[in-house]
Image (cartoon, helix red, strand yellow):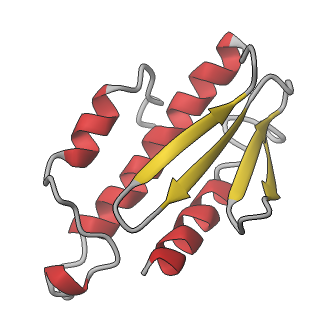
Amino acid sequence: KIGALQFLIQIHMVSQGNLPEKGTWFPKQNEDGGLDLYYKDGSGMCTIVITEYAVKAERYGSKPSLQYLLQESVLLHTVLDELEKTAFDVEDIEEEKRLLQLKEKDGIEKARETLPARAEDS
């Protein structure tokens, strides 16, 4: 299930690469098979690491710009939205057979609370 979940999140992250404008994020596959997203100003890079027991975002960059931090937060909210759909919006699949199962039902909401910015609904 890890590979399938990682693939789903990678597809989602690539789909976000031109938001809020073309060229905001530059995706590049890393040597672990994951996806790194480099920000357009070169100040930072974000990757999502998926293991059997965790999904975590890792930031790289010695001094990410304020703009990077804002856009990373917006991006991570969209990743959490995708994880929430994967865990809960699949009524026709039994919970134990779902691609993502949470130990804590409010785990996604707890993660969301640590992020400062979220895009406005359009």
What residue is rendered at 46% in x and 47% in y? Answer: 56
Estimate the x, y position of residue 46 in percent, counting from the top left. 66, 40
Q: Quadrant of residue 118?
A: top left
The quarter of the image holding the N terminus is bottom left
Q: Quadrant of residue 30?
A: bottom right
What residue is rendered at 54% in x and 55% in y? Answer: 49
Estimate the x, y position of residue 9 in percent, counting from the top left. 54, 63
Estimate the x, y position of residue 59 in percent, counting from the top left. 63, 33
Between residues 38 and 104, which one lies in front from this camera angle?
Answer: 104
* Lateral position of residue 29 relative to residue 34, left or right: right
Image: 84 above or below 60: below
Image: 97 above or below 11: below
The quarter of the image holding the C terminus is top left
Q: Quadrant of residue 117?
A: top left
Image: 7 above or below 69: below
Estimate the x, y position of residue 53 in percent, counting from the top left. 34, 62
> Total number of numbered labels?
0
What residue is rendered at 62% in x and 55% in y? Answer: 13
What residue is rendered at 84% in x and 31% in y? Answer: 40
